[in-house]
Image (cartoon, grey):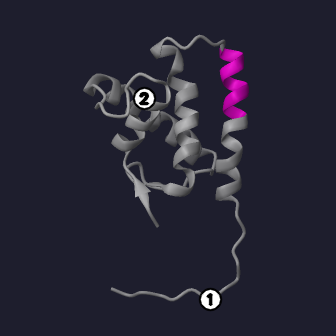
Amino acid sequence: MTTKTKIELAAAVLRKMGIVDANSSPSSVDTAYVVSEYADLLAELVDDGYAYWPENAIPQAVFQHVVRLLVNETGPAFGVQSTLEDREARKQLLKKPIIKHCRRRHSGLPVRATYF
């Protein structure tokens, strides 16, 4: 399974908002802020039973959904105007693909065990 780091996540969030262009690196302050918000979001998702991955190994299958959630959460800090009610409504919509991914039923197919 391909994963992304929280630094890659922060860069993707800042690029999605237009704070950083595709050829630049985000500042360490902006990166730290997004990573901090991600830690809070991940704790909430884990608490609700919607996340199974470690903090620094975000699965590719949910990466873009987490990016969108963080754009929604961190937007006001970077000048994106929105009300709390609008952000909460968007958050519920943006969480749906992650919930769907985490609630996928087992296929019942055999899985090869690898022992170390």
Q: What are the residue bounds of the magenta stretch?
A: 84-92
User: How far is mark 2 from mark 1, CA to CA?
Assistant: 41 Å
Name the residue: 59% across, 43% down.
Answer: 65
Residue 108 x/y as whole percent: 70, 83
* Element carrying mark 1: loop
- Marks counted in the figure total 2
Q: Residue at x 38, y 28 (%)?
A: 21
> 104 above or below 100?
below
Magenta span: helix, strand or loop, mainly?
A: helix
| Element class at badge 2 | helix
Could you tell me the amino acid type at mark 1?
Pro
Residue density around tag 1, few if under 14, some if 14–19, many if 20 or more, within 10 Å? few
**Residue with the mark numbered 1:** 110
**To which residue does mark 2 refer?**
14
Which residue is painted at 66% across and 31% down in the image? 91
Q: Position of residue 89 (x, y in %)?
A: 73, 26
Query: Is 8 colored magenta in this rendering?
Result: no
Q: Could you tell me which residue is drawn at 66 percent across and 85 percent down? A: 109
Left or right placement of residue 59 versus residue 88 in this view = left
Q: Is residue 100 left or right of residue 31?
A: right
- Occupied quadrant, residue 90: top right
Horizontal side of residue 5 vs 13, given as left or right: left
